[in-house]
Image (cartoon, grey):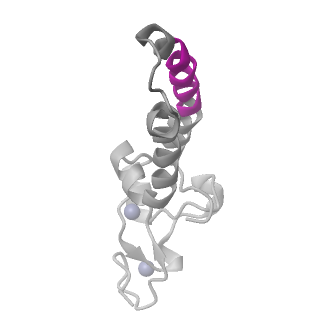
C-alpha cells in the first residue's frame, strides 16, 4: 500500500478525488466540510481551495458509466443499423430521424448536469 502523500503514514487507505494522491484517513477533509460522504478530499486540496476537476478527468474516472451512456446514446442517435431503411425517401428518413435526434439531445441533458456535479463531488460508490 502507498504511503500518505501528506504525513507519510503507511496507512494511506484513501485516495483524493481531486489530486488522485493516496492519503490516510486523518489527512482527509471531513464529510461536513466537503459536503459529500463519497468525496475524498485531502487537506492539501482543501487548503489550496481546489473544488473542481476538469470534465475530461470526470469522464476518465467514470469510464465504465460513460461507456454505457455512450453506447446508449449511439444507439439513440444512430439507429440506422437497427432499422431497415432501404426503400425510404430522403424526406421520410428525415421525418423518422428528427424525433430520434431530439430525443437523444434531451437525453444527454441530465448527463451534462451529472458531469458538472461530478466535477465537485465523487459519484456514489466511487
Ligand atoms: Zn496522512
Ligand atoms: Zn488532493
Q: Nearer the viewer, residue 126 or 104?
A: 104
Q: Nearer the viewer, residue 50 or 116?
A: 116
Q: Main secondary structure of the magenta part?
A: helix
Instruction: Name the spot of residue 4 as percent of width and height, x first.
Output: 38, 81
Residue that protrudes farthest toward the top in the picture: 91
Q: Is residue 120 visible?
A: no
Q: The N terminus appears in which quarter of the rendering?
A: bottom left
Residue 20 sits above or below residue 55 on the image = below
Q: Nearer the viewer, residue 3 or 64?
A: 64
Instruction: Name the spot of residue 19 as percent of width and height, x first.
Output: 35, 61
Instruction: Name the spot of residue 64 as percent of width and height, x first.
Output: 47, 60
Residue 43 sits above or below residue 14 on the image = above
Q: Quadrant of ligand 2?
A: bottom left
Residue at 35% x, 71% y is 21
Q: The C terminus appears in which quarter of the rendering?
A: bottom right
Residue that protrudes farthest toward the front in the picture: 87
Q: Examine the structure image and report whether residue 97 is included in the region drawn in magenta.
A: yes
Q: Which residues lie in the magenta part?
A: 95-108
Q: Nearer the viewer, residue 112 or 20?
A: 112
Residue at 49% x, 76% y is 14
Q: Is residue 51 visible?
A: yes
Q: Examine the structure image and report whether residue 41 is included in the region drawn in magenta.
A: no
Residue at 37% x, 56% y is 60
Q: Is residue 110 left or right of residue 116?
A: right
Q: Is residue 107 left or right of residue 2?
A: right
Amino acid at each position: 500500500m502507498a504511503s500518505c502523500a501528506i504525513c507519510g503514514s503507511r496507512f494511506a487507505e484513501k485516495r483524493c478525488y481531486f489530486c488522485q494522491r493516496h492519503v490516510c484517513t486523518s489527512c482527509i477533509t471531513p464529510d461536513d466540510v466537503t459536503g459529500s460522504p463519497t468525496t475524498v478530499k485531502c487537506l492539501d486540496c482543501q487548503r489550496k481551495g481546489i473544488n473542481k476537476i476538469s470534465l475530461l478527468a470526470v469522464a476518465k474516472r467514470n469510464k465504465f458509466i460513460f461507456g454505457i451512456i455512450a453506447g446508449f446514446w449511439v444507439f439513440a442517435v444512430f439507429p440506422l443499423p437497427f432499422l431497415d431503411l432501404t426503400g425510404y425517401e430522403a424526406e421520410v428518413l428525415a421525418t423518422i430521424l428528427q424525433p430520434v435526434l431530439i430525443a437523444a439531445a434531451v437525453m444527454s441533458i441530465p448527463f451534462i448536469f451529472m458531469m458538472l456535479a461530478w466535477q465537485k463531488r465523487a459519484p456514489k460508490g466511487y
